[in-house]
Amino acid sequence: MTMQHYFEANDGSRLPKIGLGTVYIKGAKGVTSTLSAINNGYRLIDTSTNYNNEGMVGEAIRRSSIPREDFIISSKLPGEAHEYDKAILMIQESLYRMGLDYFDKYMIHWPLPKQDKYVEAWQALVDAQKFGLIKTIGVSNFLEEHLDRIIDETGVTPATNQIERHPYFNNNELVQVNKERGIITEGWSPFGRDKNEVLENDVLKEIGKKYGKSPAQVILRWNVESDILTVAKAASSKNQQANLDIFDFSLTEEEVGKINALDKGEPGRLDGQHPNDYEEFD
């Protein structure tokens, strides 16, 4: 089992630098895969109501021998529940579905500015935290204007902002926006989610060869050295172990520059999911 390393959030919580992503992981196979990850040292498990697998994650937690307080269980509020009352009920239902008394971490999945209800959704998370339903609250896919609005209108700054982040779309401007506000950036789909060939990139292969690491491990190390908490999906035990085995080498400034230079800007964004346009219901 690999030792985890941690970031400290603006609310004092400690969050592992590498978390397990569970999108598309479901059912009995999902329970087995998640238990494997837990046994390999993962403690931050990232799910979402939209993943339709919260029950699977809850079952894996119950079957594991790890104390509940050692986990960081994170889920996300879907767009259908941005209205305040709906959000509170959705958080409660998700907890019942998972068999948990509280979430360690919970986020708004997308801002959905066309609906313009993300401020009341954020207020619901702020209050749910006060009610003891959530320990650490954050957002996902929020841009600068979304962040500043919820901070201005509620007085509460998110602990984390989970955003798309991979070498072909490094999102560095938004990473800096988060950093300036004391918000930890979480990166989703670090390997491009099979939508691009980033894991076959020659630059990453060359850097990896120097350290005896895979392109995936180079990407994760690049994120960690940028103070980014990375949620990486890994179904097999081999990949789960490899994703945690990134704390025994460091990239040079030149190597980081080479990886940053792979950025394609907006064309590199997966599925064109721009936070100002993307609607979960389409």
Image (cartoon, grey):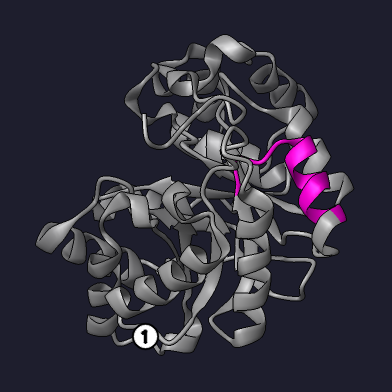
Q: Is residue 22 above or below residue 67?
A: above
What residue is shown at x 46% (from left), y 32% (from top)? 279
In which quadrant of the rendered view does residue 123 lie?
bottom right
Residue denoted by label 1: 66
Left or right: 184 as drawn, with respect to 192: right
Q: Is residue 234 above or below residue 97?
A: above
Q: Give, as a three-letter code, the residue at label 1.
A: Ile
Observer-nearest residue: 275 or 117? 117
- Residue 186 in sight in this render: yes
* Residue 235 position in % (x across, y down): 26, 50
What residue is shown at x 42% (from left), y 77% (from top)? 92
- Assign a secondary structure to mark 1: loop
Highlighted range, magenta: 140-152
Q: Quadrant of the image for the N terminus? A: bottom left
Q: Main secondary structure of the magenta part?
A: helix
Residue 5 magenta-highlighted: no
Q: Quadrant of the image for the C terminus? A: top left
